[in-house]
Amino acid sequence: MSRAAVPRYLGDDFSAASPGLRFGMYLNIWTSREDQEKEIRDWAGRRSREARELAGILETQGMDAAIAYARDRRNFPRLWEKNDFAARDAWKNICRLSDNDKAAVEGLRKRQNALLAGKDDAGCMTLFGRSTAPFVTGMGNEHPLENGFSFLWPYGVPYLPGSGVKGVLRQAVRELASGQWGESEWNDKPIVTLKVGKKQVSLTAMDLLFGLESEGHGKEHFRGVLTFWDVIPEIKGDKLMVEIMTPHQTHYYQKGQPPHDSGMPTPIQFLTVPPGSSFHFHVTCDTLRLQRIAPDLLTEADGAPRWKALLTEAFQHAFDWLGFGAKTAVGYGAMETDEDARLKQEQARQEAREQAELEESLKELPGDAAELERARLSGAWKETNDFLQSVEAFLEDRDRVSPEALDILKEAVGQRWPGILDDPEATTGKKKKPKYKPRPKKIALRIRELV
């Protein structure tokens, strides 16, 4: 029986746990003590020299000594280390994102957008990327299955640390400034000289934006004006992927044996974020500090400050040639600009600005008039039935309304049913049938009472 490597009091049901928590439990593939003891007793009853030795150790020294003996014998099963038969199902379970996980990802991204909305446009920028290859990060994190993965705690969802974004972009800037990638806005020429410590230090655009750290034991350090935020990927398909790498020369690299082609391949599984996932890269700039140190980087070109143009070029180079995360040398972490996400974000921000302007304009109206105007402008009155329900609910149990609210009601009702406010009881035809249906007629009569 496979189980997670956690205390017994936590139970066995981790279906509601996040991917990070399930991964932190070493997957649900580790065997129990009962399984180990049963395996030892089964093998001790077999007819072989090692089985007889194992039976003797079990009888004279006990179960712990028998397990220790069996671990070093290749002819014995190794279920006490890892249950490989349960591994595939365990990996499947860890990859899925529950509704709670999806809500956490969406909530974190909304929080980042809300924080950015409160900042000056000149001091922040967002670039949108979409992965064209599997993305992996944090493989160097310690884990019993050899390869770790970076999860954002306490939410347990995948993320790309802001420090990793900064490192990739700094390398992109170095390559662009070298001049080996064609013409670029980046170069190694100092643009300002500042007193750092007791020395005058010349700083390039990269030093100003990313920071300067002296080599060796130097004390000339400068903190860059840019801050790179953690990236919360929107995972395509709402599940992670399992990739496999298969080293073929373990006997040579790890055991010191001569190289040959008959070595046993060793499949190793690891987690990735699938291709097609969306990445939003947020960067903020300390514009007050930059204005004081290097105002030229704040001058606008093509409608945006120069530091944004420089950073956009660095991002594009990173998308095209470097990639983000781990294993980029073999194609992982490749990105492309996500134009659809950019347009969607611009639309959302425009709607937010329009809503803010609307709320500001409604402050000048009485409360009941603001309520009606908000419903009208939101599109809630487009369908006739929705309009009738909204107005009926508004007029219910009201003794009076403000003149502004009455004007809104009269205008809206008059547009839908011309003439109804002048004569709600009007008839038509020789048979004198009512011109208006009961519900609009009732609303018109009620409005006339309130006038």
Image: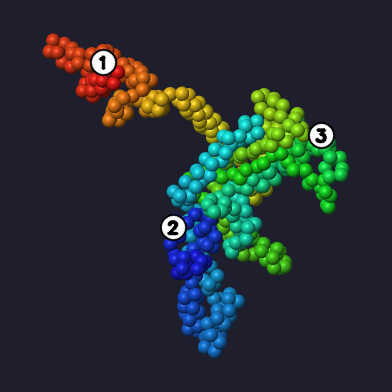
Residue at which label 2 appears = 15
Q: Amino acid at mark 2?
A: Ser
Q: Quadrant of residue 447?
A: top left
- Residue projecting furthest to the top: 430
Quadrant in the picture for the N terminus: bottom left
Q: Amino acid at mark 3?
A: Val
Residue 197 appears in the rendering = yes
Q: Secondary structure at mark 2?
A: loop
**Which residue: 48% across, 81% down?**
41
Quadrant in the picture for the C terminus: top left
Residue at which label 3 appears = 192
User: Is label 1 in contact with label 2 (beta carbons under 8 Å)?
Assistant: no
Query: Of callouts 1 and 3, which one flags the residue occurring earlier in the amino acid sequence?
Result: 3
Residue at which label 1 appears = 420
Residue 245 appears in the rendering = no
Q: Is residue 226 above or below residue 256?
A: above
Depth check, front residue: 445 or 189: 445
**Which residue: 64% across, 38% down?**
283
Q: Amino acid at mark 1?
A: Ile
